Image: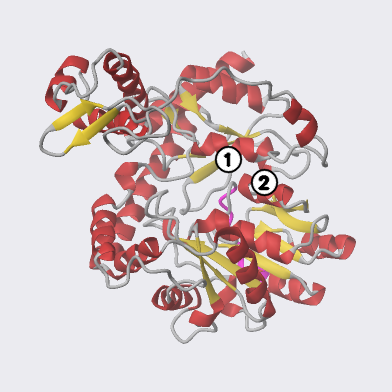
Amino acid sequence: MNERSSVTDLADSLRREVERYPEGRKLPSSRALMERHQVSPVTVSRAIAVLAAEGLVVSRPGAGVFRAAAFAGGGTTGGGSPLAAPTARPGDLSWQELALSADAGPRDRGAGALFATLNVPPPDVVDLNGGYPHASLQPERLLAAALARAGRRPGAWERPPVDGLTELRSWFARDIGGNGGPLGAGDVLVTAGGQSALTVAIRSLAAPGAPVLVESPTYPGTLAVARAAGVRPVPVPVDEDGVRTDLLAAAFDATRARVFVCQPLFQNPTGAVLSPERRAEVLRIARTAGAFVVEDDFARRLVHADSPALPRPLAADDPDGVVVHLRSLTKATSPNLRVGALTARGPALRRLRATQVVDSFFVPRPLQEAALELVADPGWARHLRTLGAELRDRRTLTVAALRRELPGLLGPHRPGGYHLWLRLPEGTDEAALATAALHAGVLVAPGSPYYAAEPPAPHLRLSYAAVDSPARIAEGVHRLRRAYEGLTG
C-alpha cells in the first residue's frame, strides 16, 4: 500500500472513531496509533493533519490531540477551525454539459497523456512512463539544505520582482547564453517551471486560431498547450537528425505561421539531436519567414555520462531575437522545484512578461531563493555528474533488455534524456498493447498522443528514469514482452 492510500485509510478510520468521542477527549498517542494500524509516523501525522483541517481534532503541542468542540452558529472549534458539516447530497450537475458545450468543444484535448505521465502508479506496477526521475535520483538533501538556507535569507518572504530575482535571471542568462554571450539578466523572465514557460510562450506569440508549427512526433504537453490556447498545431516530421528543414520551410510557406516549437536536444519522444547543418537552417528559415523559434531545452541537465559534447542552445547563436528559449531546473531536481526561465529579446519579452503577470503574477520568492542556493552549492555539479552516470546505466540496462526481450522494436537512440521510442509492427494496436501492459504490471505510453495529426505508424515510448530501481527495468521490459506476445499471438 502506498503512502497516499495509507493516509486516506487511517484518516477514515480515525474519523469514525473520533465522532464517537466526547468533546475534549484525548486521542491515543501517535505511537499507539502506529502500532494499532501498522503505519509509519509520517502516515499518522498526515492523517491527524487531515482531521485537524476538517475541524474534528485540535493538536496541542506537548499535550496531544483532542476531539474538537462542536461547531454551531458560525463559531469555531477549540482549534480555531469550523467543524466540518455533514456531507450534503450531490446536486444536479447536468446543466454543466450545456454550459460547457457552448464554445468550440472540450478544452482538455491532449491532457490525458499529461495525466498519465503525472499520475503515480501502484507500487506493484513498473513505471516505464513517468516524466520525472525517481526520488532516488533527486538531490533531496541538497534541496532540503537549499530550502532551509533560502528561508533564512534577508527578505526571503518579501514580494519578488515580477520578472524574477536579478541574481537568478543573471545565472540563467549565463547558463543559456554562456559567459559574455548574447543574453543578460534583462533578457530573462523567471517562470514556474518548463510547462508554464511553454504556455506563456505559445499564448504570447500566437494569436487564437493561428497555425503553430510543431515537431512530429512531439511532446504531448506542447499539443495540449496549443489546443488550450486555441491555436492550430501543424506537424513537421522529425528524423534522427531532428526536424526536417526542407519540410519546415514548406510548412512556413504553406501556413504563414509565425511560431515553430521544437526540442533540438534529446527530443521527446524520439531522442533526436538537431544536426549542426540543420541548426543553422532552422534559424535561417525562421528569420526569412519572420517567425519565432520556441526552443524547449528541457533535457540539457539530463545528459548521460557517455554523451559527446553538447551543442550550444540555438539561443546562444541568435543575435536577432528569433529564438525564445525555455529551460527548467525541475527535471534534474524534483517535480516540486518549479523554477524555470524564458529568454527573449525586444518586444517579444514584453509580451511574455505581460502574459505571465496576468496568469500568475510571479514565481514565489522562497522557491527562487532556494534555486539560487542550489545552483551555488558545490554539491550541484556533483549531483549532475551522478545523475548523468545513473541515466547512462539505466539506458544501458533498458536497451539490453529490449534487445533481449523485444528485438527489432528499438530504433536509433542517443546518450541523453530519459526515454526510448519503439516502432511497433504495422497493424499493432498500440492502445490495446498499453492496456495489456498495464494489466501485466508495467506502465508505458502509446505513441498516438505524440502526434498532432494521424500517426504514420504505431509506437510506444519507454521512460527509464521514473523506475524505482534499475533492477526493475528488466522486469518491466519482460512484462511488456508478455503483454505483447499475448496481444499478437
In this rendering, is residue 398 above or below 284? above
Q: Main secondary structure of the magenta part?
A: loop
| Residue on which the image places disc 2 | 224
- Within-10-Å neighbours for mark 1: few <14, some 14–19, many 20+: some
| Residue on which the image places disc 1 | 114
Identify which residue is drawn at 24% across, 59% down.
148
- Residue found at the far right of this picture: 254
* C-alpha gap between disc 2 and disc 1: 8 Å
Direction from residue 303 to residue 434 in the image, left or right: right
- Within-10-Å neighbours for mark 2: few <14, some 14–19, many 20+: many
Identify which residue is drawn at 59% across, 72% down.
314
Circles 2, 1 touching at the beta carbon (< 8 Å): yes
Q: Nearer the viewer, residue 431 or 412?
A: 431
Give the x, y percent position of residue 86. Answer: 45, 20
Q: Which kind of residue does numbered mark 2 sit on?
A: Ala
Q: Which residues are magenta?
A: 270-278
Q: Which kind of residue does numbered mark 1 sit on?
A: Leu
First reached walking from the N terminus: tag 2 or tag 1: 1
Q: Nearer the viewer, residue 130 or 266?
A: 130
- Picture quarter with the C terminus: top right
Magenta includes 486? no
